[in-house]
Image: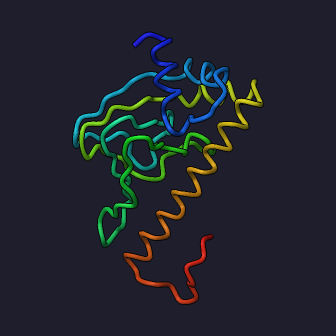
Amino acid sequence: MQTQDLTESLHQHPFLRNMDQELINTLTSCASNVVFQEGNYLFHESEDARTFYLIRSGRVALEAGGSERGQIRIQTLGPGEVLGWSWLIAPYRWHFDAYAVEQVHAFAIDATCLRTKSETDWHFGYEMLRRFSEVLERRLEATRLQLLDIYGTVKGDKGEKF
């Protein structure tokens, strides 16, 4: 895919909706297309988080190791969603395992490139942080709901978001 095509495709991803074209151009220099076959892992818990993904098609399961219960599925992500925020916060290690439930086409964004650009272009960095804070909030809520489903209602929980 040529750079112009990649820029146009990135601009269509919901995570980047309404992002200034100049900022999309900055992001494009850190991006590439990737494909993961069904059953392949995108990453494992505790590995270095060097990339995040903008899912174009397919589904990815996020799971956490649960000692006695084995792997616990936290969430399944699909087209239009973002996979990975661990690249953003030191020590830059994955907190979950992620594997392709079905073939996945995604944009892979190089984290080192993105952090460097964010440090030199504060407007770009702020915009990425603002967008990722929304992803973090959704993931925390999904994790909370999954834990309530597994372990039942926690005493004092009145359905409040944390």
The one nearer the camera, 10 or 94, is 10
Count of picture labels: 0
- The image shows residue 71 at horizontal and vertical percentages of 31, 62
**The C terminus: image quadrant:** bottom right
Q: Quadrant of residue 27?
A: top right
- The image shows residue 139 at horizontal and vertical percentages of 51, 57
Residue occupying image coordinates x 29% and y 65%: 70
**The N terminus: image quadrant:** top left
Residue occupying image coordinates x 34% and y 46%: 60
Q: Quadrant of residue 18?
A: top right
The one nearer the camera, 100 or 24, is 24
Q: Is residue 80 above or below residue 118?
A: below
Residue occupying image coordinates x 44% and y 22%: 32
- The image shows residue 155 at horizontal and vertical percentages of 53, 89
Seen as rendered, the residue at the extreme bottom is 155
Q: In which quarter of the image is residue 130?
A: top right
Residue occupying image coordinates x 67% and y 20%: 22
Q: Tell me, what colour scheme is on the image?
A: rainbow
The one nearer the camera, 95 or 60, is 60
Q: Is residue 93 left or right of residue 98?
A: right
Q: Is residue 4 above or below residue 102?
A: above
- The image shows residue 74 at horizontal and vertical percentages of 40, 61
Q: In this view, does 143 lie above or below 118?
A: below
